Image (spheres, rainbow, N blue to C red):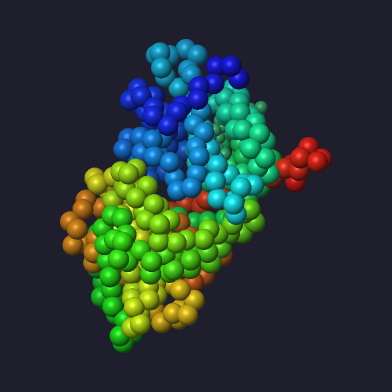
Amino acid sequence: MSDLLRIGASPTDADVDAWHSVVTAAHAADLPPTVPAPCRVETAGGLRVPRVRSRHINLAVPMSHGRPGEFAGVAALRLFDEAENRTTAWIERLAVRPEVRRRGIGSRLWEALRAVLVEEGRTSVGLEVELGGAGEQFALAHGFRCALPLTVYVLDLAHEGGAPGPSLPNGYRFVEWTGVVPSRHAPAFSLAHQAIADVPRGDLEMRPRVWDAERVRVLQQANVDRGAVLLTVVAVSPDGAHAGYSVLGLPSSDAVRAVLYETAVVPAHRGLGLGRAVSLRMLEVLRDQRLPVREIAGTVADGNRPMRAVGKPFGYRPERSLGFYQARWDYARDQYT
Ligand SMILES: CC(C)(COP(=O)(O)OP(=O)(O)OC[C@H]1O[C@@H](n2cnc3c(N)ncnc32)[C@H](O)[C@@H]1OP(=O)(O)O)[C@@H](O)C(=O)NCCC(=O)NCCS
């Protein structure tokens, strides 16, 4: 559409404010009040700092009646650059101000994204939706189908504390860092990072990535550049290999809700209690940091029994249901599959 704005990689502060205003208005309308709204640091970081090995297309629809510079809706598309995911992509944001919904603005944004996807030769795209809300209805109406159901679990740190301290098998030890992985740990950490490939993907087209020291460093650096505080705990085996790890992120240093980014244990070290050990150690590390965090949220695929078992004794409560939805199309037949 002619009035669609392309927001480049260096948006003005006014563009960030206008984008953030849509995102927070949508958040207030669509999510339970217990879920903290995204902060401006997160919005600005998301627009200004590209994700690892990706290009971003950010679009906005201006408000037709409103203050100059205001947006009615926004959409952010992530185009993976790596060979294994060249045919798919991810919609990181698609939001319309509550007062102008059901007027086709979301559909216009989707059509514009789809034109980019076609031009790029992508045959599928995914996005995250809150189940039971407008997002799910919209996604279904546009040919998306649920590829992976998930649940968000939240641990209230005020009620946590009864859990025993972490214990490791003989010879194992913890290594921790704040921020980007130190270069001396990066090679071993990148090997352990391959274990994240075992996270259930349901019907998603997205393939696991191959990690190396540079890629994990770039991954963590991008999160830090986006304004996040990152905490990493690793269980190191007697031979010095990184056997399991957990990464926690705070969207900004004053965030009250931390997000569990990843927990994974290398297959050869599974069944030894390392998943729980790194998770318990993370709680201690978090306490030592004296950050204002009051709760931890983790999103787990409903079919991921091992991860649900790891979190069970901690007192995580289910907060809400999500789905990774996906649309696929067949160019030859020019139709959704
Ligand atoms: C999802 C969202 C972007 C839709 O924006 P919108 O501008 O209202 O969407 P459209 O007007 O283009 O709606 C297109 C179709 O989607 C479906 N739809 C959208 N919202 C719906 C709702 N609340 N209930 C039922 N169907 C809905 C309808 O089929 C609608 O067509 P219709 O109005 O002719 O019946 C908006 O509700 C939003 O910002 N939600 C929160 C963020 C979110 O969930 N994003 C992920 C989207 S997949």
Q: Position of residue 310 (x, y in %)?
A: 42, 71
In the depicted view, which residue is nearer to us: 65 or 41? Answer: 41
Q: 328 above or below 192?
A: above
Q: Position of residue 141 (x, y in %)?
A: 67, 37
Q: Position of residue 232 (x, y in %)?
A: 31, 62
Farthest residue in the bottom direction? 170
In the depicted view, which residue is nearer to us: 304 or 218? Answer: 218
Farthest residue in the right direction? 333
In the depicted view, which residue is nearer to us: 247 or 218? Answer: 218
Is residue 261 in sight in this rendering? no
Residue 262 image-quadrant placement: bottom left
Q: Residue at x 23, y 67 (%)?
A: 284
Q: 331 above or below 293?
A: above
Q: 92 above or below 262?
A: above
Residue 40 image-quadrant placement: top left
Q: Residue at x 56, y 63 (%)?
A: 200
Is residue 49 in sight in this rendering? yes
For ligand 1, which image quadrant applies?
top right
Q: Which quadrant would the N terminus be assigned to in this image?
A: top right
Instruction: Judge left or right: residue 108 versus residue 158.
Output: right
Q: Residue at x 63, y 50 (%)?
A: 146
What number of labels is visible? Answer: 0
